[in-house]
Image (cartoon, rainbow, N blue to C red):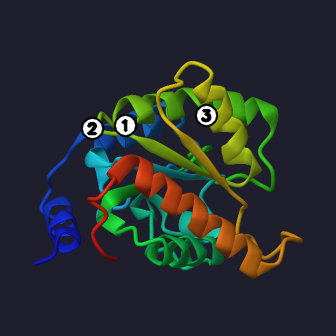
Amino acid sequence: MSAEEEAVAGHDAGVAGALDELTRRWRRRWPTRLIPGFDPGSAREAARILVLTQSPARSTAVGGAAAVCGEGNDNATARAIVDARRDAGLRRDQYLRWNAIPWPTEGTPRAGEAAEAREALEELVAALPQLRAIVAVGAVARRAVSQLAAGRGDIPIFFAPHPSPASPVPRDVKHREAVLAFAAASAAALGDDKGTS
């Protein structure tokens, strides 16, 4: 059984961790907002790389309380992130994907939403004791991480354009920049322990 399969099996067997507790806490704090769970096939609490996007896609929200922010999501952003991390040689079980705003938003989040979500991002980073690098995907994640970094200069941050089809940046350029960001984060966080996809 691969490390990825073991992680999923352990999560499915009811092994709860700090991230599951965070999810429960956030759902109590924001009871009217959908907060998805964390990808059981990801590194979860052992993540050395955190990949942040803007917010959960509407297609994720359809899953309700069973929704998960991860590679199994059927949307263009999830597929683009999977392609980029694979091309960078990063395994799914070596990173954690999450959102700067942990609930679905309508378009670009309002400033108040971003400020409200900052507390959740700080709690998430605190729950990742092995975190060594962050990849911010898109402008919303970049702003959130930049504000977070003001208090934490010890974690290198890498930036990639959002892979949204609505972006005017050509898809091949967005992919190449995302691969470079993943590869740089991987080198910073994992060194020679990159493994294979």
Kindly identify which residue carries mark 1: 22
- Residue 64 percent location from the top left of the image: 49, 62
* Residue 183 position within the rendered picture, expressed as x and y whole percent measured from the top left: 50, 62
The Cα–Cα distance between marks 1 and 3, rounded to whole angstroms, is 13 Å
Q: Is residue 49 visible?
A: yes
| Residue most extreme to the front | 192
Q: Quadrant of residue 39?
A: bottom left
Position of 143 relative to 171 (above/below): above
Say if mark 1 contacts mark 3, CB within 8 Å. Answer: no
**Pointer 2 with pointer 1, Cβ within 8 A:** yes
Residue designated by label 3: 117
Q: Which residue is mark 2?
A: 18
Choose the circle earlier in sequence order: 1 or 3.
1
**Secondary structure state at the residue bearing disc 1:** helix
Residues at badges 3 and 2 in contact (C-beta under 8 Å)? no
- 171 or 23: nearer the eye? 171
Type of the residue with mark 3 = Ala
